[in-house]
Image (tube, rainbow, N blue to C red):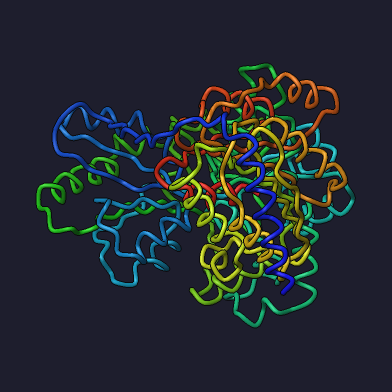
Amino acid sequence: MVNIIRKLKKSLLCGMSAVLAAGLLTGCSDSGKEKNYLGKKGEILTIVSGSENKELEPILEEYADQNNIRISMVYKGSLDIMHELEDGTTDYDAIWPASSVWLNMGDTAHRVKYAESISINPVVFGIKKSLAEELGFVDKKDVSIKDILAAIQSGKLNFCMTSATQSNSGASAYIGFIYALLGTPDVITESDLDKPELQEQLKELLSGIDRSSGSSDWLKDMFVKGDYDAMVNYECLTIAADNELTQEGREPLYVVYPFDGLSIADSPLGYIDNGDSKKEEAFKGLQKYLLSSEAQDKIQRTGRRSGYTGVSDKNKDVFKSEWGLQPDRVISPFKMPDTDTIRKALNLYQTALRKPSATVYCLDFSGSMSGDGEEQLTKAMEQLLIQANAAKNYLQASDKDINIIIPFNEDIIYDEKAEGNGTEMENLYQDIEACDAGGGTNMYTAILQGMDDLASYGKDYNRAIVVMTDGESMEDYDELQERVEKDGSQIPVFSIMYGDADKRQLEKIADLTNARVFDGRDSLTDAFRKVKGYN
């Protein structure tokens, strides 16, 4: 009965808002996305890849031009790539995840052929050099995960890292933390994960994360643009960050290789056999080239390693010792746990160990969302708020998470909060389901209210605002800019565009708050799932 009354109340409120503003309706239309090809003509190879491989596009494009093929790179997170394999997709000709872990977990039907490691990339801590010196890490031979934990416990170190459930660099670092804190066992087991001391240490270590991301490449961009202490990321992306920082005259990162928990990305490239012999031939040619000494030399110039025993003499200048890089270091990977243990570890991270999040969803219920847009939005939120659905993508809430819903048109329709991961989350969904679209569009009022709502949640939470809109807001963003600049707000405002949303307007907000814009025109469900991986 309580839920029925709640639903009727919200339905009445939303319906009244729609009627009162009916004269302000605006239209919307879906807009498709064009593919970007590396190469001008020839056989098309579509590769689903981790975002870290964006750095290799010039090498791929040069090969494509010289060999009359076109390469379409589709960048997705590790979990998405694993799901593509599990679902038996036929949309791609090749797969190029950051690690063999995701290939092994997803390719249960054994459709992937000819998988070969293209490069070796350790996951490292990049720490501002002055802070690394203060912590005693500069020139220290062996820095351990417990040394890093002690720096976090003392309040001297915070860091940025991708989500362990959405991106390989975060997952690999997290498994490395577990391995080190367990005392480097032969292999991590499911029962190991139940140890109270381990869980407490992991909570303390992960409490040091002050920004998260669903993409390793975007994490690097976010770090360079912002002002943060440290970043956990691939060695190659840390080198790229240092190049950008020094070009801007800013302090570089000093690379720390935790000796007892150093994880590796082995970058396997494999062919998905869809029965097309021409594509198979094109794939084999590309892979052969990438493994050639000529291409491996070019790949090393991007900060990647060709093997476990160091880099060639002529490329050591890329791995600058003053940045803490060790080109002669022998990389010794630990044995990854089995699939069931990895899945348990990821669920544990998401539901119990990670720093809790406080997220505001500003949802466009203006008139142009009526019909398909409203239906898609409701289905998308069902995947996040109904926890059985969220668990399929490791996006479930913890018992400390805060989720706030602010539907809007030209005004705020309502402002509702749920704490934890219980029935309050389902109530949020039921109230969204009861809401009707109508009226104009003013996302700025909702965003500013979201900032007010998040003000009481400090450093113990990873805070974020997600605004979804399908139109151009009737107000400009001057008040938002003034708020951010006045109070130094560190709350990122991520945007999801749909229909006729003004991308330039959303990009201004993202630039102001060091966030990013997601394209929901093809699928709001996919867009909301991706953006949640950033908090």
Is the N terminus in the top left, top right, bottom left or bottom right quadrant? bottom right
Q: Please, is residue 308 above or below residue 193 in the view?
A: above
Residue farthest to the left, as pictured: 277
Q: Looking at the image, which is closer to me, 469 or 121?
A: 469
- Who's the residue at 69% across and 64% down the image? 427
Q: Position of residue 53 (x, y in %)?
A: 42, 40
Q: Position of residue 193 (x, y in %)?
A: 67, 76
Q: Looking at the image, which is closer to me, 309 or 508?
A: 508
Q: In this view, does 28 lie to the left or right of 236?
A: left
- Who's the residue at 24% across and 51% down the image? 93
- Tell me if I can see residue 164 in this picture: no
- Who's the residue at 15% across and 48% down the image? 279
Residue 216 picture quarter = top right
Q: Please, is residue 465 above or below residue 301 in the view?
A: below
Q: Is residue 346 left or right of residue 339?
A: right
Q: Please, is residue 338 above or below residue 143 in the view?
A: below
Q: Looking at the image, which is closer to me, 215 or 360?
A: 360
Q: Position of residue 130 (x, y in %)?
A: 80, 32
Residue 466 picture quarter = top right
Q: Position of residue 417 (x, y in %)?
A: 77, 55
- Tell me if I can see residue 74 in this picture: yes
Q: In this view, does 428 lie to the left or right of 267?
A: right
- Who's the residue at 71% across and 49% down the image? 359
Residue farthest to the bottom, as pictured: 191
Q: How many labels does the image show?
A: 0
Q: Please, is residue 79 above or below residue 463 in the view?
A: below
